[in-house]
Image: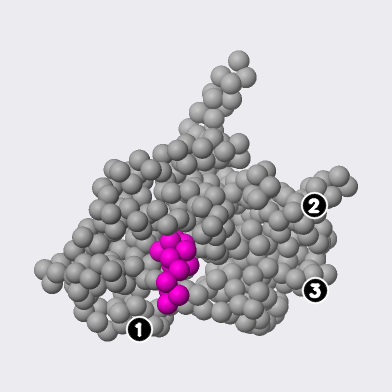
């Protein structure tokens, strides 16, 4: 009877959600304001941390009288303008006068000194739901910093634009890096808040962080609060109001990113330095009868791969709704396999470190294993590769189910 009731309740929630606009948690001011009133706040935020009316969450909090002592900035910086991988320093934000502490420069987590005047830590950043998009790694570091020094963390959840499916190889921890820290598939189908619950529930944080988390619970404090999105389900079609990073300019890139980011680990251009990154990709050595493009220096991609060289390859740009339907809830490997098949110097296709250590190759870090590269080299079909993912995905889905907050 309980299972039947829960199923009916989920159906009612889902039906309501489909008729109402999806609201990021930041928009649900009444849900987070009472807990932050009178507290000194540190917030991890960037240019995506906005409400539906376009107001930044930092400005909204300040208007509500919230005392923000520090802003923590991720990859691309607080204003979201830095190139991918660019190290960003600390500074004072001109618009607010609040110190901005970079967590993508000299360090990736706040130190004890950064938190000594902060009572509550807040996290509000738009994620893509793709393992190698680094914000879930930033989240993990931020959570550990909070729990180690005994600070409660509030996450203002945001919809996952790729939250409708789970796919890809599950990461082998031997290939752990900042573009993949935990044993989850490339597309994990969870919001940032759900993912945070998994990090705690599976004890994936460091022992020191878990010890701090448990100590706060024993003292009667709530270490982790996730403010829910409004009217969201995992089938919601959510269009991001701003581009999440310089090289994810629109929803077409958001949808293709899980499939085409693999080209970052090869000699091919992944489209940086064009108006449609991760939608076009190619190389000068591929057949000249394919789609042609030339990467150039531009804001967000000052030195793109194969800059100023004519490349031949594919153009997947198009209507985002049509692309989402074409994705059909899965990663597409056909372009990677075809690019390798057509590439004349196959031994040079994948970028390998000078040391020759393939464990450190960027492609294997993206894949989360060495198996995918070997499968591509061996000429395995997409169906054969996908078959090898099935056990890991099945196990992950069971684990994931424990932490979902939305129908």
Q: Is residue 34 above or below residue 308?
A: above
Residue at (60% x, 15% y) in the render = 1
Relative placement, left or right, of 250 versus 268 is right
Give the farthest residue toward the front: 356
Query: Which quadrant would residue 269 be assigned to in this image?
Result: bottom left
Looking at the picture, tell me which residue is in the foreground, 246 or 96.
Answer: 246
Position of residue 74 measured from the top left corner of the image (x, y, whole percent): 59, 69
Characterize the local packing of mark 1: few (<14), some (14-19) or many (20 or more) Cα atoms within 10 angstroms. Answer: some
What separation in Å lies between label 1 and label 3 (alpha carbons)? 39 Å
Residue at (14% x, 69% y) in the render = 287
Residue 113: mark in rendering: 3
Characterize the local packing of mark 3: few (<14), some (14-19) or many (20 or more) Cα atoms within 10 angstroms. Answer: few
The span picked out in magenta is 353-366
Q: How many marks?
A: 3
Residue 16: mark in rendering: none
Looking at the picture, tell me which residue is in the foreground, 224 or 58.
Answer: 224
Which element type, helix, strand or loop, lies under badge 1? loop
Badge 1 is on which residue? Answer: 297
What separation in Å lies between label 2 and label 3 (alpha carbons)? 20 Å
Position of residue 249 measured from the top left corner of the image (x, y, whole percent): 39, 67
**Is disc 1 in contact with disc 3, using a CB cutoff of under 8 Å?**
no
What separation in Å lies between label 2 and label 1 (alpha carbons)? 47 Å
Badge 2 is on which residue? Answer: 211
Looking at the picture, tell me which residue is in the foreground, 199 or 348.
Answer: 348
Dot placed on the residue nearer the N-terminal end, 2 or 3? 3
Q: Is residue 20 above or below residue 40?
A: above
């Amino acid at each position: 009877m309980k299972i039947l009731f829960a199923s009916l309740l989920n159906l009612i929630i889902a039906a309501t959600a489909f008729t109402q606009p999806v609201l990021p948690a930041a928009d649900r001011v009444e849900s987070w304001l009472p807990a932050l009133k009178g507290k000194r706040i540190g917030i991890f935020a960037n240019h995506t941390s906005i409400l539906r009316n376009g107001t930044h969450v930092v400005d909204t909090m300040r208007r509500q009288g919230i005392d923000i002592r520090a802003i923590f900035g991720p990859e691309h910086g607080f204003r979201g303008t830095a190139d991918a991988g660019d190290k960003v320093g600390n500074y004072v934000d001109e618009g607010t006068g609040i110190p901005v502490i970079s967590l993508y420069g000299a360090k990736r987590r706040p130190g004890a000194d950064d938190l000594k005047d902060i009572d509550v830590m807040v996290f509000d950043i738009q994620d893509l739901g793709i393992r190698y998009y680094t914000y879930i790694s930033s989240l993990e570091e931020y959570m550990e910093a909070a729990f180690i020094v005994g600070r409660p963390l509030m996450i203002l959840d945001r919809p996952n634009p790729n939250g409708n499916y789970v796919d890809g190889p599950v990461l082998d921890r031997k290939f752990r890096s900042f573009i993949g820290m935990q044993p989850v598939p490339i597309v994990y189908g969870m919001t940032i808040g759900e993912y945070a619950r998994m990090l705690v529930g599976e004890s994936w944080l460091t022992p020191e962080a878990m010890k701090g988390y448990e100590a706060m619970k024993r003292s009667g404090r709530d270490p982790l609060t996730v403010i829910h999105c409004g009217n969201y389900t995992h089938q919601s079609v959510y269009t991001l109001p701003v581009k999440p990073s310089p090289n994810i300019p629109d929803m077409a890139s958001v949808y293709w990113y899980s499939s085409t980011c693999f080209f970052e680990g090869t000699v091919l251009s992944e489209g940086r330095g064009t108006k449609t990154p991760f939608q076009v990709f190619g190389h000068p050595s591929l057949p000249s009868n394919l789609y042609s493009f030339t990467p150039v220096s531009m804001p967000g991609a000052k030195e793109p791969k194969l800059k100023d060289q004519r490349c031949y390859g594919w153009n997947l740009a198009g209507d985002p709704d049509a692309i989402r339907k074409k994705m059909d809830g899965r990663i597409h490997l056909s372009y990677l396999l075809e690019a390798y098949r057509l590439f004349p110097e196959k031994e040079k296709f994948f970028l390998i470190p000078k040391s020759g250590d393939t464990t450190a190759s960027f492609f294997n870090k993206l894949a989360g294993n060495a198996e995918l590269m070997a499968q591509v080299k061996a000429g395995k079909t997409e169906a054969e590769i996908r078959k090898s993912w099935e056990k890991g995905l099945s196990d992950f889905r069971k684990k994931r189910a424990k932490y979902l907050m939305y129908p």
